[in-house]
Image (tube, rainbow, N blue to C red):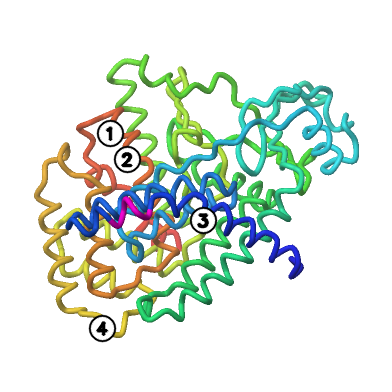
Amino acid sequence: MATTRALLARSTRIGAVGAAHLLPVLPAALVKAVRGDRAAARRLLYRRLTTLLMRLGPTFVKAGQVLGTRRDVLPAALCDELSVLQDRVDPMTPEQTSRALVEAYGSETPAEFAEIDSTPVASGSVACVYRGRMPDGAEVALKLRRPGIESTMALDLALMRHGARVMARLPMLRGVPVREVVENMCGAVFGQLDFAREAENLRRLKENLAVVPRVRVPGVRDDACRPRCLVMEFMPDLDVDVARSMSAAVRKRFAASAMTAIYHMLFVDGFVHCDMHPGNLYFTRGAQVVVLDAGFSVQLTEELRRLFAEFFMNMSIGRGRYCAEIVVRSGTGLRPDADVETFLVRMADLVERSHGLPAREFSLIAFAAEMFDLQRRYGVHAAPELIFPLLSLLVIEGTVRELDPDLDFQELAKPVLMRGLFGRRAAA
């Protein structure tokens, strides 16, 4: 539990950094607003806020990444800025690595491994990844937690929760689920420290996606895992540029396999990897799709999984009104001034317009952005359990479009939707 003194010291530090970073741009933003260009003023402040989050450290970066998915609550322009947030953290020093190994295994040279390469192969805000070799000769990857990261995150998240309680009382935010959104965000961020849960997530994904051709998830080495270190099968020769060097036919297979994996998570299993950015999704020269880092995964309830599948199935056949009703049914509630009937009409129109678009012109990102704008405008709050899985679709769309510009997202989803809606029932 964070102490009052520690919270006060951390909040003072955050306030000082925030003031130093934001105050210098306020005059310029005010000038733009006075001149009538309020959109430009907001963009300036949103961009500055995003860079502030990067300066405040890993907790705020991850919080911004999660909040950037809540287009049903936050302004689209702010979400656009938050979407570019990336972990920019130097690798651990040799001294930090030694300390992390001692914290995880009690020794700088754990007996569980025959060898550990001291140079990280990847670096993030929560952990660094090292290559190692087991006594049986197997090559493994060690995801080793940074020393001290838990206390820093606990302080920052406690302050965010306190800030949410204060903000929820503001008249301008009346009816907005501020505390619920922030609590959900805090859970998602702090959950990425739980390596035991991530190990279980990887095991589940490996088992679930075994039925999807050409998709591979690394196996977990349970005998070497510890609460502060996740050990898994090492996947060699992972290179983000592999797909660019492959033929058009192989690239199309990459795109179809990656999307089928996402659809299978969403519509069949309901257990979804929500962070499918290029750093966690690779393509190999053997035409396989490799999925890594399952720390940010969610389990949909059976009801939400089915509603999600029904929404996409009805979207693929242009049943706009039914899709709109699903959005309302799956939500967490309505603002006091909600206009549900207008939302239903506008949402139905969006689905029907999207259904008529050629495959190359349909954009999941554009569709979701307009849907979230309608929800925000007419007071329909989306369930966070659906927001995060939807994020997995939006994150991967750019990668898939680069591989196959003509991929028909809706047509590719249909056979998976059939398994999700009827295959499970038949199996039961």
Give the mark, 4 or 1, whose residue is nearer the N terminus: 4
- Give the CA distance from mark 4 to mark 3: 35 Å
Q: How crowded is mark 4: few (under 14 residues within 10 Å), some or many (20 or more)?
A: few
Task: Name the amino acid, label 1.
Answer: Arg
Q: Are marks 1 and 2 in contact (CB under 8 Å)?
A: yes
- Give the CA distance from mark 4 to mark 2: 34 Å
> Would residue 133 be found to the left or right of residue 362 on screen?
right
Task: Name the amino acid, label 2.
Answer: Glu
Image: magenta residue range? 26-30
Where in the figure is residue 58, as x and y percent of width and height?
A: 59, 47
Q: Residues within 10 Å of mark 2 (few under 14, many from 20)?
A: many
Label 2 belongs to which residue? 397
Inspect this view and state whether residue 137 appears.
yes
Label 4 belongs to which residue? 337
- Above or below 9: residue 380: below
Q: Which of marks 4 and 1 is in front?
A: 4
The secondary element bearing badge 4 is classed as: loop
Give the mark, 3 or 2, whose residue is nearer the N terminus: 3
Where in the figure is residue 279, as x and y percent of width and height?
A: 50, 33
- Above or below 286: residue 403: below
